[in-house]
Image (cartoon, rainbow, N blue to C red):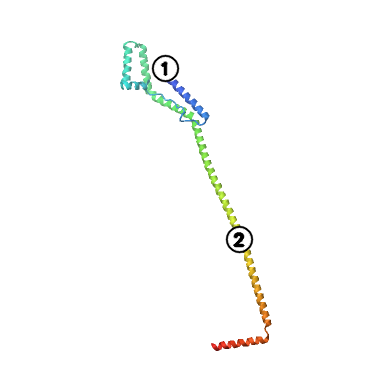
Amino acid sequence: MLSRIALRSAAARQSATTALVARGSASDVAGVRDEKNFPRPVRGEPGKVRLGFVPEEWFQFFHSKTGVTGPYTFGVGLATYLFSKEIYVLEHEYYTGLSIFLMVYYATTKFGPKIAAWLDKEVDAVESNWNEGRVQNIKDLEQAIEEEKTAQWRAQGQELLIQAKKENVLLQLEAAYRERMMNAYTEVKRRLDYQLEKSNVERRLAQKAMVDWVVSNVTKAITPDQEKQAIDRCIADLSALAAKH
């Protein structure tokens, strides 16, 4: 009976695992695996048992109806019934089996934990060896993602640098434009100043020539008598002024 139940549960687990693997493979082929709807298969762990071989579910079944002692009472009553009705005869094979059971029980309690720990360690080592490639692949992909993010950040920095260079070029063009405008202003002002100074010089020369011409002509027009009369008049005016003071 127990062997049938164990075989059925193992077959159910195997079929469920196969279905999960098939669905997971289909999703992997399509693209990124859907971990939520198609989780990865997990290594199955044996259920809890009592007395070394009786499943915990049997005790839970009795516990809801008969309490804690129900399963043990059922087992003892069933054994008593089988023995009293000689359905199960206590022949010499029974005592041989009882002796073997005691030896197995002693070996299990004595060496069982150590063997179980060693087997668990071996199983974990095999599982870690199987997962090592996948974990390393995941790490490599995560590192590639980080490097891609860094490259994108650097590309954004290059865009900012190019923008700054464009602004610098525009500033240089503006400075060159202003410098040329200042040069043009300076040259135009210098030429205008030259024309103004030229006009001033020509006007002064004309005035000087006109004054010289007027003086020379007036001097030529004055006779010696007129010059003597003008001098006498000036002397008279000076004397009159001196008398007043």
Residue 196 falls in image quadrant: bottom right
Kindly identify the residue that appears in the image at 54 percent across and 88 percent down. Answer: 244
Q: Label for residue 48? A: none
Crowding around mark 1 (Cα neighbors within 10 Å: few <14, some 14 to 19, many 20+) is few
Above-or-below relation of 231 to 24: below
Q: Could you say where residue 55 lies in the image, as x and y percent from the top left?
A: 37, 21
Residue picked out by circle 2: 185
Kindly identify the residue that appears in the image at 62 percent across and 64 percent down. Answer: 192
Residue type, numbered disc 1: Arg
Q: How many marks?
A: 2
Q: Is residue 106 shown left or right of residue 174?
A: left
Above-or-below relation of 148 to 123: below
Quadrant position of the C terminus in the picture: bottom right
Residue picked out by circle 1: 4
Residue situated in front as seen by the camera: 128 or 109 = 128
Above-or-below relation of 38 to 225: above
What is the distance, in whole Å, between disc 2 and disc 1 at their CAs? 109 Å
